[in-house]
Amino acid sequence: MAAAVGPREPSRWRIPLAIVALGAALAFVPALGLPAFYDSLLYLILHWIVLATSWNILSGYTGYFSFGHGAFFGAGIYTSATLMSRWDWPFLWTLPVAAAVACVLGVVVGAIVFRVKGIRGEVFALLTLAVTFVLGTIIVNTPIDGGNGVSLAAVAIPKFGPTPSSTFYLLALIAATATLLVAWAIAVSKLGAGLFAIHDDEDAAEVMGVPTYRYKLVALAISCSLAGVAGGIHALFLNYVTVGEVFTITVPLTVVLMSVLGGTRHWAGPAVGAVVITLLLYSFTAADYAVAGKAMIGVILIAAILFMPDGILPRLQRLWQRRRSDRPAPPLARAPLPTVPAHGSAAAVGGVLLQARGLAKSFRGVKALAGVDVEVRRGEILGLLGPNGSGKSTFINVVSGHFLPSGGSVVFEGKELAGRAAHRIASAGISRTYQIPRPFAHQTVLDNVALAAMFGGGINTPAAARREAMSWLVFAGLQDKALDRPDALNLHQRKFLELARALASRPRLVLLDEVLCGLTPSEIDDAVALVRRIRDQGSTVVFVEHVMRAVMALTDRVVVFDHGELLAEGLASEVMQRPEVMRAYLGQADVDSGHA
Amino acid sequence: MSGFTMPSATLLAQSILSGVFVGALYGLLGLGLSLSWGLLRLINLAHFAFAFLAAYLCYQMAQMGVDPLLSLGLIVPLFFAIGAGLHWGMMKFQITPFNSLLVTFGLTGIVEALIQTIWTADFRKLESSYGEHNFKVAGLYVPLPELITLGLAVSLSFVVWAVLRYTDLGKALRASAEDSAVAAAFGINEKRNALLLAGTCSALASIAGVCLALGFTLAPSQIYAWIGVVFAAVMLGGLGRALAPLIAGIVIGVSEAVTMAVTAPSWAPLVSFTLLIAILLFRPGRAA
């Protein structure tokens, strides 16, 4: 949730130092000389912390709930087991290989699965689960396992701690500390901001410049490597590994349960869940109520989803914040300059900024855009007009990379953009708004804008991006709402948030899709003034609009689309008088001549 | 059969036949799952737990001397009520499809624990007179319990298909699944229909459970063994359809059985899961 904390940056190193200090303190537990079974219980807690936290890095942060964690964990187990039992590798040397094998497996699966649009939610869960069973079936039927399992009784356990069980404990402690550090570092970094944005609205994130495919793959690779290490350690801990116990639905469901219970949007949530669930399970097993424990897990899972959908940790955080907010709220730290950000290249009007040629888009044979030529000149406000279904929004969707064009070219500042991924188009200097605002629902207004500054605008740290974002919130008049969630905004404010997001990447070209639709007349006046200021600070504007008053007031030129084709082009006042335009818009000329 | 049939051909034919039988059970289990997922947007993992609970109830009643098929008279209404009750709760909390998967998994764990408490984790096998009536047709061994399963699966699939296609109720259900707001605006009592359908899905699960009890050895942990392959059948067939799970189930059952005959039984899961992966990759829209 670090991405949602707000503009205040509490001392950056407090949390990682706390993690390391806690890890170091816990390293002295074996010196207490507790009975071995405490070491094993603590080992299991740490083991589940690693597994649940590593799962969360992809699945919790992005919302791609993987049920394939058992496969990556199992790949680690069998890599270590095979290397130790067959090739007599020393145990510790097998761990990096276990991580690498799990990582490669994850990247191969991800590289295929993430390419297919629509594999999300339950489909992604089922698919990754199926991968688990396929891998398990292959391993059990090949000499890797051979159906009998792999015994590691002959493998030497390295002497880390005073006893074998304390060795496992210390290894798991190192792994858990490292995993939590990684999970924290991702959550507060640019990578984390991108992953959280994917969770809320993947298409919008991509359009704002997040390389969604690469980020998901990186998150999966990190997640799998950590699971592979946990598997490598667990192989020797189990001493005897079988496919039937590794490649099951139990591992993924347990980590899902732990993470959902603790809170999937927080780096420490899964660890909290892991501690609670492991202790609960243990207390039931120790008291000989293993069956009741199983039922208890079910009850907890149901209760958690129904009554605490965000998890324990966010719930506690909210209680904590409520107590703190009884005190007077601190003023927004480092009040940003209330000036309009100066723009780099407010070049002279006239030169061609973007040239679309023969741009076409068909949906299953329906030609939404039938090959249009549009020229956008640097520094102008170009109105994009036409009746409903004429292809205006499709034009914006194709130019911004939301849809792949079926044909034609888009040249922007001399670079061909047609067919490029949306995030590349965003970083090339084009941004857009959505007709129906699509804010990231789980992030503050400020972080919504900061994301655009980071990805489209090429700022690398969340803190710097927030400072940049704040000045754009001032520009759009939303500075008082900076720390609110988007659902606290009204439509007018959401539209302005869309504008602030589109501007925060400092684009040379802004595509506005019906920003005025649904606004009251006085709100429209505000918006018209804002659009004019956007152009004045140096961006070129293409805007799709039905509100004629605004079109007349704002545009330098207009182009009119009809049935996916270019119908007219020129000054607004002149073009709107042309008979073919009036016919397309009102349809009356036809009716009249029919009756005449 | 004619004299020159090669023994392996008989073996193969027998494999295919047993594949059809087990596939029919996949289809019967998948029918309720597919309807619930496609028409109610509820991915009901507890479907499998309900089937096993019904199987154990059937087993228990058989121990007390009740004919397994007669026990349906009690089991079907009972599970109809359970399914409708569950869906009532789901509607109350407005659960998303993904969360329904998690919640019903929790429910599955509870039912599993319940079964284990009452009937222990040991394997149980229903002994009924049906198990003794096996006959041979054209040199192929045909067990009666499996034949009953096939008959029930085919007839129930056709009944559901006809109801969905030709009755007002079926049309209303399909309309609600497509656009519930518009359907409601046309006066469809969505809530009542949904409860009716949810109850029917669970009733179908319980019938599949009785078939399970007739043909298979029961253990609480076996609940999970069916999930993957039945999901594969449901996805292969497409959601919310009546005949598709049966056809897909038989396709998967036969290909598994042939795989087992040609290689080793332990390779069988590869078929269904590879198929599932392929469907999801190439037709992800089927599940959306």
Image (cartoon, rainbow, N blue to C red):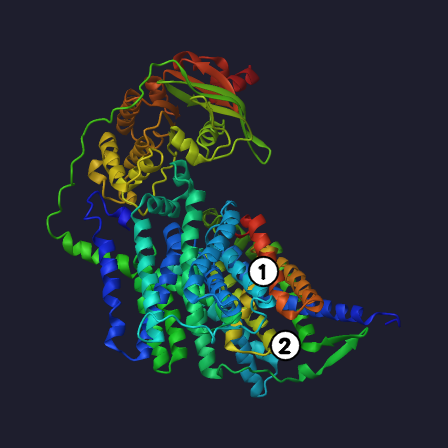
Q: Is residue A398 above or below residue B271?
A: above
Residue A575 or B264: which is nearer the viewer? B264
The three-letter code of the residue at mark 1 reads Phe
Could you tell me residue B121's position as x and y percent? 49, 81
Q: Amino acid at mark 2?
A: Gly
Q: Position of residue B186 (x, y in %)?
A: 48, 48
Determine whether, in the image, residue A360 is placed left or right of residue A220: right
Q: Is residue A225 above or below residue A486?
A: below
Q: Is B5 displayed left or right of B283 in the figure?
A: right
Question: Label 2: which residue?
Answer: B215
> Pointer 2: residues within 10 angstroms few (<14), some, or many (20+)?
many
Q: Are marks 1 and 2 on the same chain?
A: yes
Q: Is residue A540 above or below residue A60?
A: above
Asked where in the image residue B85 lies, by quadrant, the reply is bottom left
The residue carrying pointer 1 sits among few (fewer than 14), some (14 to 19) or many (20 or more) residues within 10 Å by Cα, namely: many
User: Which residue does the numbered mark 1 point to in the structure image?
Assistant: B273
Q: Nearer the viewer, residue A285 or A587?
A: A285
Regarding residue A262, the answer to whether it shows in the image is no
In this view, the residue farthest toward the bottom is B64
Q: Nearer the viewer, residue A289 or A499?
A: A289
Q: Secondary structure at mark 1?
A: helix
Q: Chain of mark 2?
A: B
Q: Position of residue A216 (x, y in %)?
A: 43, 47
Q: How far separated are the C-alphas under marks 1 and 2?
A: 23 Å
Report x, y in % for residue A390.
49, 26
Can residue A485 be seen?
yes
Q: Which residue is situated farthest in the top direction here?
A: A574
- In the depicted view, which residue is nearer to us: A167 or A8? A167
